[in-house]
């Protein structure tokens, strides 16, 4: 517990009468004060009036917080410029600090020196000064929120308070007020007489913003982070959902350590604190990936008579969309390009192994179809498929100096 509370008015302490011994006395070992207020750190000191018939004369006396090499008088410290005053009188050595900031939290020590050999003394323990800010605590009860003006200094003298809504004074002067949840208002408080030092405002979440990293092309297997940001006080809770409303995460970031094509879609987040909640717009995650295993089909699917037309179709899931090329076994060049090809007047000469290659900037995938004409009828069956990663394939081509078309049985 703090021995002395300063909130926020100046504390005055009676002076302890001197004794004929070396001593620095602090009536409080710890002091708590509010940011922006003024504090006095009380102190008295004593020393022998004479030693060996030599009258003791005080040569210097000062307060310090920093003593890396030797104590530094706070009056010369730029951090305290214009804010420090010594209330020295006889054996009183009180320190006054104005316009307190959080940086003033420190241990303060008083030191004095005399003309006597070895005649100097420092208050070893010093006084610990803690600076705190006013805060508005929020507690929700059904559709209302109770706002309480609070300080860790635990004010003992029940001061009057001033409440503000959107920066304008309210009539309430109590330590707490009730407001409706989901209002689009900001609330803060101060101690009456110290209106310049208000608490931070509390308010419901603003409209969240969502972003995707990396912002460049997202490749399957890479790491992707979707971030929800929201201005709110108290700090909001976050929840991520997919476009179907399924809850995914309770963090402000939704992380895909190895994103897959199935993760492509739209996502949104909800933010909530004790004063309200808001929902973001959608953010789109578009994953780029190589073609999946192509699906090959023949039309008509029923019995095909020699001399009729046959249509071959190749389909593959890919992003970006795949380009299709058809090849026939033992032929040097491509048979055709496009997702669909038609062979007119189909005959035994057309028998053989056909395969389509689906390719995009991320890779390629092959699927082979074996067509055979027997006794005027066409039989079909799918034989093989291969998958090639574009980057690895290019490396092989550079090493071997040739273009490779991959096929396996």
Image (cartoon, grey):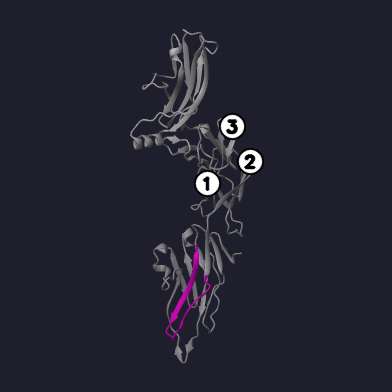
Mark 3 lies on residue: 245
Residue 281 seen in render: no
Residue for point 56% across, 33% down: 242
Q: Residue at the far bottom: name it.
A: 53
The CA span between labels 2 and 1 is 17 Å
Q: To which quarter of the image does residue 390 belong?
A: top left
Q: CA distance from mark 1 to mark 3?
A: 32 Å
Asked if the magenta segment contains residue 112, the reply would be yes
Q: Is residue 352 left or right of residue 183?
A: left
Residue located beneath label 2 in the image: 144
Residue 354 visible (yes or no) = yes
State left or right for residue 132 relative to residue 321: right
SS label for mark 3: loop
Q: Report which residue position mark 1 lands on.
A: 201
Q: Is there CB contact under 8 Å for labels 1 and 3?
A: no
Say which quarter of the image contains residue 271: top right
Name the residue rendered at 45%, 20% in the picture: 354
Q: Secondary structure at mark 2?
A: strand
Nearest the viewer among 350 and 296 is: 350
Residue 315 lies, in percent from the top left, at: 48, 22
Q: Residues within 10 Å of mark 1 (few under 14, many from 20)?
A: some
Q: Badge 2: how crowded within 10 Å, few (<14), some, or many (20+)?
A: some
Q: Earlier in the sequence, mark 1 or mark 3?
A: 1
Q: Residues within 10 Å of mark 3 (few under 14, many from 20)?
A: few
Question: Mark 2 or 1 closer to N-term?
Answer: 2
Residue at figure coordinates x 54%, y 73% from the top left = 26
Residue 110 lies in the magenta stretch: yes
| Image marks 2 and 1: residues in contact by CB distance under 8 Å | no
* Quadrant that contains the N terminus: bottom right
Stretch in magenta: 105-126
Secondary structure at badge 1 equals loop
Between disc 2 and disc 3, the foreground one is 3
């Amino acid at each position: 517990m703090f021995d002395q509370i300063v909130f926020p008015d100046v504390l005055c302490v009676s002076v302890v009468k001197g004794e004929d011994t070396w001593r620095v006395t602090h009536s409080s070992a710890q002091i708590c004060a509010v940011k922006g207020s003024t504090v006095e750190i009380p102190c008295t000191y004593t020393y022998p009036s004479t030693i060996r018939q030599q009258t003791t004369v005080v040569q210097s006396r000062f307060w310090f917080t920093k003593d890396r090499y030797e104590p530094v008088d706070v009056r010369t410290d730029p951090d305290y410029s214009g804010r420090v005053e010594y209330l020295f009188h006889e054996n009183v050595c009180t320190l006054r600090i104005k316009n307190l900031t959080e940086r003033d939290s420190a241990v303060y020590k008083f030191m004095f020196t005399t003309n006597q050999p070895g005649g100097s003394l420092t208050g070893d323990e010093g006084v610990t000064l803690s600076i705190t800010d006013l805060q508005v605590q929020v507690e929700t009860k059904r559709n209302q929120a109770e706002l309480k003006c609070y300080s860790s200094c635990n004010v003992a003298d029940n001061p009057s308070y001033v409440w503000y809504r959107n920066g304008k004074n309210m009539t309430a002067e109590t330590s707490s007020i009730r407001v409706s949840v989901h209002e689009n208002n900001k609330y803060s408080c101060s101690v009456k007489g110290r209106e310049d030092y208000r608490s931070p405002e509390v308010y419901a979440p603003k409209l969240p913003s969502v972003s995707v990293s990396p912002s460049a092309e997202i490749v399957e297997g890479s790491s992707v982070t979707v971030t929800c940001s929201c201005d709110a006080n108290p700090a909001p809770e976050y929840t991520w959902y997919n476009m179907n409303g399924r809850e995914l995460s309770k963090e402000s970031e939704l992380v895909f350590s190895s994103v897959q094509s199935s993760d492509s879609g739209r996502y949104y987040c909800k933010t909530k604190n004790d004063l309200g909640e808001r929902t973001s717009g959608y953010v789109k995650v578009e994953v780029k990936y190589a073609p999946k295993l192509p699906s090959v089909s023949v039309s008509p699917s029923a019995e095909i008579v020699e001399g009729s037309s046959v249509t071959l179709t190749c389909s593959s899931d890919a992003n970006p969309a795949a380009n299709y090329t058809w090849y026939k076994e033992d032929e040097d060049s491509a048979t055709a390009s496009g997702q669909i090809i038609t062979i007119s007047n189909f005959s035994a000469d057309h028998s053989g192994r056909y395969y389509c290659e689906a390719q995009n900037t991320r890779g390629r995938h092959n699927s082979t179809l074996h067509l055979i004409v027997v006794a005027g009828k066409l039989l079909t069956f799918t034989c093989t498929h291969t998958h090639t990663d574009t980057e690895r394939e290019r490396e092989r081509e550079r090493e071997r100096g040739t273009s490779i078309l991959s096929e396996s049985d």
